[in-house]
Image: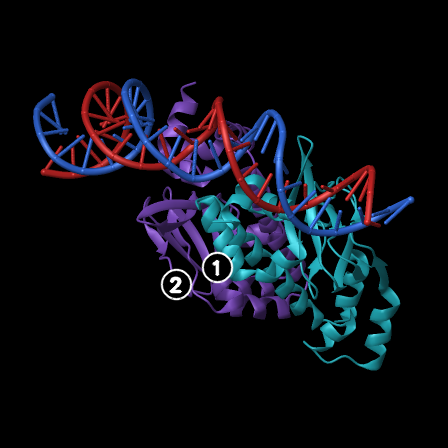
Chain colours: A cyan, B purple, C blue, D red
Amino acid sequence: MELINYIKSHLTLTNDDELFINSMTQTETYKKGDIIREPYSKSKVIHFIHQGFARNYYVKNGKDITYFFLKDNSFTFSVDAVYFNAPTKYGLQAEEDLILTSFKYDDLMKMLERIPKMAHLYEIEMAKFIKQLSDKYYLIQFQSAQDRYNSMLERYPDILLHVSLGHVASYLGITQETLSRIRTK
Amino acid sequence: MELINYIKSHLTLTNDDELFINSMTQTETYKKGDIIREPYSKSKVIHFIHQGFARNYYVKNGKDITYFFLKDNSFTFSVDAVYFNAPTKYGLQAEEDLILTSFKYDDLMKMLERIPKMAHLYEIEMAKFIKQLSDKYYLIQFQSAQDRYNSMLERYPDILLHVSLGHVASYLGITQETLSRIRTK
DNA sequence: GATAATTTTTGACCTAAATCAAAAAATGAA
DNA sequence: TTCATTTTTTGATTTAGGTCAAAAATTATC
């Protein structure tokens, strides 16, 4: 869904508001595997996934580890960069061909000033992110590899269709070999 | 620090604003070990820790597991209850004698309406929470028990002084026995 | 201060999952 | 369709950290 339609599905915009928002956002396309943001960037850009599938990742001891998967109709940005002016560990990569609509955090603030009811939408988006992080944390803290895979199957079966085994394994905090063995059980 | 002073350390309040805020908040004290909120509550109350030390916890297979530690001058509430009207897995317990200032989420919305510049403070508090969750997640995803303890020592040495070994161990996602062995290394 | 209750440490053993390595399968390119 | 590259599976081995149990130390209660 386009960003503007996503917003309009939550609140009513005047024509002028719509033009204002469009003037502050840019839409780009990426190919599968493209890096949208490198790790250690301090970019304060917020991305909305219009179409496709992406992931946040980081590199640790030479290993590529998936931090988060991102579906269409979701937002992503670096909390470290935007709120703490610090480089983020996490890069952003297209898992498949991608259409993104992006805007600067500072411009978001201008939009919220002009269209105050959008602030609540932003608040909800932050809450969604907290909930996802929190659920994921719960999943990993004391569950076996099998349990982790099971709840992935249950909650995000669609992700498994889009993504290589290695990316899922590191997301679940297990090795690729272990995940492979679990799947063939 | 008192909630009102915490707010005033970030922005200027008129006398009227201050009275308004005070009229919507309540301060209570708790003893070490007291349960402030039971797991599975749907309470939409936001707590500010004025003095003392607390933790979020949950129970899994009969085991008590620490989800998060909470220092003074921090806020805590259930994202599930407030934003998704769902019961939260997590309870809230005083790790030591506690003074809390509490207010309802709905009343926070009234405060933000009246004092719009407070909205940014709330936004920052949500961002802080995301950062903490995110850092904690990073810690647990692919680090050894030793590494987890080390970064705890480095980043939150104060927590270790306040809290029993078992509570710290479950927070780090390891058993109490393992943590004990690590400490005596 | 003695006893009870809780918390922490130590020990022996076991298991889930990591590591290393190589084969098989799938995907892509020429 | 063949060859090259990447991804997934399978196998053998190792190990970090879990489990169970009991002793020691600390803290709380009468």
* Residue plotted at (61% across, 62% down): A158
- Label disc, if present, on residue A86 of the rendered structure: none
Front-most of A123 and A68?
A68
Identify the amino acid type marked 1.
Answer: Ser
Crowd tier of the residue under label 1, counting other residues whose Cα lies within 10 Å: few below 14, some 14–19, many 20 or above: many
Q: Determine crowd level at label 2: few under 14, some 14-19, many 20+ residues with C-alpha closer than 10 A.
A: some
| Residue at horizontal 48 percent and vertical 59 percent from the top | B78
Distance between the alpha carbons at the discs numbered 1 and 2: 9 Å
Residue that appears at 69% across and 49% down = A56
Rendered view: B43 above or below B11: below
Vertical relation: B147 (above or below) B55? above
Chain that bears disc 2: B
Q: Which residue position holds label 2?
A: B41
Is residue A173 visible in this depiction of the protein?
no
Q: Provide residue A45's location: percent of width, then percent of height.
A: 79, 54
Residue B3, image x, y percentages = 52, 53
Secondary element type, mark 2: loop
Element at badge 1? loop
Do we see residue A14 in this rendering? yes
Badges 1 and 2: C-beta atoms under 8 Å apart?
Answer: yes
A20, A6: nearer the viewer: A6
According to the picture, the residue beneath numbered tag 1 turns out to be: B78
**Residue B112 horizontal/vertical position (percent):** 62, 66
Q: Residue at the location (48% across, 32% down)? A: B158
Percent across and percent down for residue B181 are 39, 23
N-term mark: 1 or 2: 2
Give the left or right position of residue B171, taking residue A106 as reference: left
Quick check: B113 above or below B145? Answer: below
The quadrant of the picture occupied by the N terminus of chain A is: bottom right
- Whether residue A86 sits left or right of residue A132 in the image: it is right
Q: Amino acid at mark 2?
A: Ser
